[in-house]
Image (tube, rainbow, N blue to C red):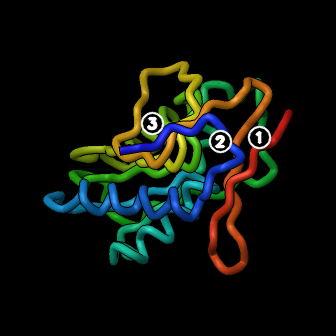
C-alpha cells in the first residue's frame, strides 16, 4: 500500500525505501526464479540495496533504456549512458523491474522492450519508490511506496550518499 503526499518536500526516501522493500519481500514469498533489474540510475541503486537484503545479489541486473526510448530522437543521448548488464537467464524468470520515479510510463515500456531482447520472462513486476502521476502509457506499479503531486515544471530526483542512504529532491525546471 502506498502513501499519498501533497507536499513532495516532506518525502523521507529512507522510509519510502523500507516500505517498498517490505512490499517486494511480501509479494515475492511464493515466486520462483526471482531476479531484480534496476533501471539506471536511481532504480539501479534501489535494486542493489534490495538484492543485498533479499539475498539476490547473484540474480541482479541493470538496464539503461537510452536506446530503447521512443523519444530518443527528441532527447538525444545522455552523457551518463551505462551498458545494460543482465548476468542471468531471463527466460522463464520472475523479474522485478525497479525504478525510482514512475512518471509517463515511457521508461518502463523501454525497459520491458529491452528485457525481451534477453529472453521471455514468466512475469515482470514493477516496483517504484514514487509515482508522480502524469502517465502517458497504461503502466502501473505492482509495488509502490508513495504517490506525490508535482507541478509540471517540477521533477523528483533520487540521490544516494556515500554511505548508501537515499534522499529525494524536488527540482524546478
| Residue 59 position within the rendered picture, expressed as x and y whole percent measured from the top left | 36, 69
Give left or right: position of 6 versus 78: left
Which badge, 1 or 2, comes first in the chain's sequence? 2
Position of residue 136 relative to residue 88, above or below, is above
Looking at the image, which residue is at 54% across and 23% down?
135
Count numbered badges in the picture: 3
Farthest residue, direction bottom: 163
Which badge, 3 or 1, comes first in the chain's sequence? 1
Crowding at mark 2 (Cα within 10 Å: few <14, some 14-19, many 20+): many
**Contact, CB < 8 Å: mark 1 with mark 2?**
yes
Q: Which quadrant of the view contains residue 102? A: top right
Foreground of the two, 70 or 153: 153
Foreground of the two, 62 or 172: 172
Which badge, 2 or 3, comes first in the chain's sequence? 2
Residue underneath mark 1: 77
Residue underneath mark 2: 66
| Residue 43 position within the rendered picture, expressed as x and y whole percent measured from the top left | 55, 55
| Residue 68 position within the rendered picture, expressed as x and y whole percent measured from the top left | 57, 36
Looking at the image, which residue is at 67% across and 25% down?
71
| Residue 100 position within the rendered picture, expressed as x and y whole percent measured from the top left | 57, 50
Mark 3 secondary-structure assignment: helix
Say which quadrant the C terminus sits in.
top right
Farthest residue, direction right: 173
Position of residue 99 relative to residue 24, above or below, is above
Foreground of the two, 100 or 85: 100
Mark 1 secondary-structure assignment: loop
Amino acid at each position: 500500500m502506498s502513501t499519498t503526499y501533497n507536499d513532495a518536500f516532506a518525502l523521507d526516501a529512507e522510509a519510502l525505501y523500507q516500505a517498498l522493500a517490505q512490499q517486494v519481500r511480501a509479494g515475492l514469498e511464493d515466486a520462483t526464479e526471482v531476479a531484480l533489474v534496476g533501471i539506471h540510475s536511481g532504480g539501479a541503486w534501489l535494486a542493489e540495496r534490495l538484492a543485498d537484503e533479499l539475498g539476490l545479489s547473484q540474480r541482479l541486473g541493470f538496464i539503461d533504456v537510452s536506446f530503447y526510448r521512443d523519444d530518443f530522437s527528441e532527447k538525444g543521448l545522455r552523457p551518463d549512458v551505462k551498458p545494460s548488464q543482465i548476468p542471468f537467464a531471463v527466460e522463464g524468470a520472475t523479474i522485478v523491474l525497479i525504478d525510482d520515479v514512475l512518471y509517463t510510463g515511457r521508461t518502463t515500456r523501454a525497459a520491458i522492450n529491452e528485457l525481451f531482447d534477453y529472453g521471455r520472462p514468466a512475469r515482470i513486476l514493477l516496483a517504484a519508490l514514487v509515482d508522480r502521476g502524469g502517465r502517458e502509457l497504461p503502466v502501473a506499479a505492482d509495488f509502490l511506496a508513495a504517490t506525490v503531486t508535482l507541478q509540471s515544471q517540477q521533477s523528483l530526483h533520487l540521490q544516494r550518499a556515500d554511505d548508501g542512504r537515499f534522499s529525494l529532491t524536488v527540482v524546478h525546471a
